[in-house]
Image: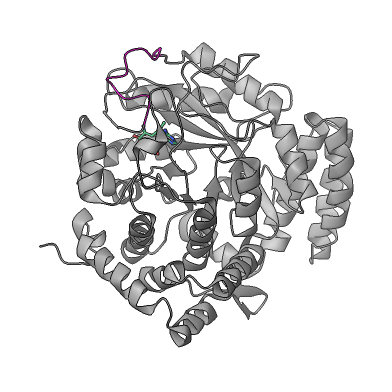
């Protein structure tokens, strides 16, 4: 039987089934152990250190106790600490992005995804470079600066060369004042060599959802195709890091398996990356299974309620305080609103999940990967964020300045966020307002920027940010960053 070892390179040792089962029993045994719960909450709370904060984070066992605890007053305190951590490290900024679907050709048999090979009635489509350019122009005209590219797994139709060519096209398009400045990549598990190629193409984060950490279920849910190989999929982030990508994004497709099992597995995966590479995941995504072409989410009987989903996100926030957390338009405005209060730091906006969807006037449904719950435009999402006390940010500075992996984590801990990320967010927001926003959004945005500028502690940084914002208004100069 495989033995648990966070630093092992073998999937079944760092995501260890026995350890997860023991964690769940430990959590059940301690869910009313108030002295222990108090200790865990105290450990999770951010502590002031110098100009910044430090946060200890929680182990998968500690965080699982909090998740199991049913006391409403404790849950409320978990939410409060999650918000404190979010504000300590990320402030009130929320980074915006959009997915870009390149191809829905796929050779896998994933039971939850409409792109599975046996689906013969869904039209198969792969963007040509001209079509990629059209999509990018449409996305730039919305105001996007950061994309996550998505593709099915198909070595013939979507080989790595195709993905690399698309990345090159995306970065090359400069339409009006627009530019895509960060391309994150969500493609199937691949080789170290291919990860190095992606790194050299200038990608931001490599994102790969585990779908489920439960090996047996994983194999049932992925009955055919290369994705069937649990170990190859689970060890992908190790290969990505070996290939030179130091920002990787984890995720679970919630609803496939029991959420407490997934939660422990997810945190063990983060602990594994920390143990082996000295740096945890850059982001964690929390998608839930949605209705799609020939997919009925109720076929998977592990769906979790909105309340539990919220608590789960908050517990992730406490466990991995330096990791960005992403929520997509799979979720409704209402759920997204609540999730933003418990630690989410990135949201997608104005998303279309079909291949070639952005260049179409009307939202197309024929090649959609899943139903989009939040169908608002990016402008509406930006205004909504501001009206709810967040700063929408289109910043992509960190990875372009080489602040990836542990260097990004160091910035998070240094307390310099208000002199760096905060002005960057305000400058990119003012670009958005100037170039793309509706009058209504501008009316909310400019006063917000004036207010938020006051929070910049360093007078020189403040002066530069103010001058840059004036330049953005009065000229076509763009892309200022600290
Ligand atoms: N093909 C790549 C792979 O195998 O990892 C990744 C790209 S896939 C387009 C992106 C993600 O969408 C998948 O990892 C899966 O978690 C999610 N997804 C698939 N079907 C879904 C559904 N019905 N509802 C919500 N999310 C879904």
- Residue drawn at (35%, 61%) of the image: 277
- The kind of secondary structure the magenta stretch mainly shows is loop
Q: Answer with the quadrant where ligand 1 appears in the image.
A: top left
Task: Indicate the position of residue 43 as horizontal and vertical percent values.
Answer: 50, 80
- Residue drawn at (41%, 76%) of the image: 31
Please name the colour scheme applied to the rendered image. one colour
Task: Indicate the position of residue 19 as horizontal and vertical percent values.
Answer: 24, 67
**In the image, is residue 346 part of the stretch drawn in magenta?**
no
In which quadrant will I find the N terminus? bottom left
Task: Indicate the position of residue 279 as horizontal and vertical percent values.
Answer: 41, 61
Task: Indicate the position of residue 194 as horizontal and vertical percent values.
Answer: 31, 35
Which residue ends up furthest to the bottom in the rendered image?
35
Evaluate whether residue 402 shows in this view. no
Q: How many numbered dots are placed on residues in this image?
A: 0
Looking at the picture, tell me which residue is in the foreground, 343 or 196.
343
Left of 313 or right of it: where is 103?
A: left
- Residue drawn at (42%, 14%) of the image: 125
Q: Which residues are magenta?
A: 113-124
- Residue drawn at (46%, 18%) of the image: 367
Evaluate whether residue 367 shows in this view. yes
- Image quadrant of residue 65? bottom left
Rendered view: 247 above or below 21: above
Looking at the picture, tell me which residue is in the foreground, 280 or 228.
228
Looking at the picture, tell me which residue is in the foreground, 339 or 453.
339
């Amino acid at each position: 039987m495989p033995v648990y070892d966070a630093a092992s390179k073998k999937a079944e040792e760092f995501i260890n089934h026995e350890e997860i089962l023991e964690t769940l029993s430990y959590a059940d045994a301690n869910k009313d152990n108030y002295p222990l719960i108090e200790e865990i909450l105290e450990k999770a709370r951010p502590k002031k250190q110098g100009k910044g904060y430090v946060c200890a984070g929680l182990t998968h066992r500690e965080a699982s106790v909090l998740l199991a605890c049913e006391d409403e007053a404790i849950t409320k305190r978990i939410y409060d600490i999650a918000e404190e951590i979010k504000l300590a490290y990320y402030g009130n900024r929320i980074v915006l992005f959009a997915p870009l679907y390149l191809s829905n050709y796929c050779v896998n048999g994933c039971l939850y995804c409409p792109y599975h090979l046996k689906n013969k009635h869904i039209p198969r489509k792969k963007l040509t470079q001209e079509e990629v350019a059209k999509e990018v122009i449409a996305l730039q005209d919305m105001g996007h600066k950061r994309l996550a590219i998505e593709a099915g797994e198909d070595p013939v139709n979507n080989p790595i060369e195709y993905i690399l060519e698309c990345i090159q096209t995306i970065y090359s398009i400069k339409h009006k004042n627009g530019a895509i400045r960060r391309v994150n990549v969500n493609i199937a598990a691949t080789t170290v060599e291919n990860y190095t190629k992606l790194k050299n193409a200038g990608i931001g984060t490599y994102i790969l959802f585990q779908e489920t950490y439960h090996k047996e279920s994983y194999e049932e849910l992925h009955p055919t195709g290369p994705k069937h190989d649990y170990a190859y999929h689970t060890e992908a982030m190790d290969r990505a890091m070996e290939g030179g990508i130091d920002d990787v994004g984890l995720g679970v497709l919630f609803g496939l398996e029991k959420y407490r099992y997934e939660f422990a597995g997810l945190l063990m995966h983060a602990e594994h990356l920390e143990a082996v590479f000295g740096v945890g995941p850059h982001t964690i995504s929390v998608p839930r299974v949605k209705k799609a072409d020939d997919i009925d989410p109720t076929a998977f009987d592990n769906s979790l309620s909105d309340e539990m989903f919220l608590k789960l996100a908050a517990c992730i926030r406490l466990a991995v305080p330096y990791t960005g957390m992403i929520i997509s338009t799979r979720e409704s405005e209402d759920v997204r609103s609540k999730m933003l209060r418990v630690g989410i730091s990135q949201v997608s906006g104005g998303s279309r999940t079909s291949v070639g969807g952005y260049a179409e006037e009307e939202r197309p449904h024929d090649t959609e990967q899943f139903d989009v719950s939040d169908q608002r435009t990016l402008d509406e999402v930006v205004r909504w964020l501001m009206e709810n006390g967040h700063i929408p940010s289109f910043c992509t500075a960190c990875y372009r300045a080489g602040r990836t992996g542990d260097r990004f984590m160091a910035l998070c801990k240094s307390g310099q966020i208000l002199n760096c990320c905060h002005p960057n967010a305000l400058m990119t927001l003012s670009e958005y307002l100037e170039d793309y926003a509706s009058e209504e959004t501008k009316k909310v945005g400019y006063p917000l920027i004036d207010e938020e500028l006051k929070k910049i502690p360093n007078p020189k940084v403040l002066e530069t940010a103010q001058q840059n914002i004036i330049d953005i208004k009065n000229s076509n100069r763009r892309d200022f960053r600290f």
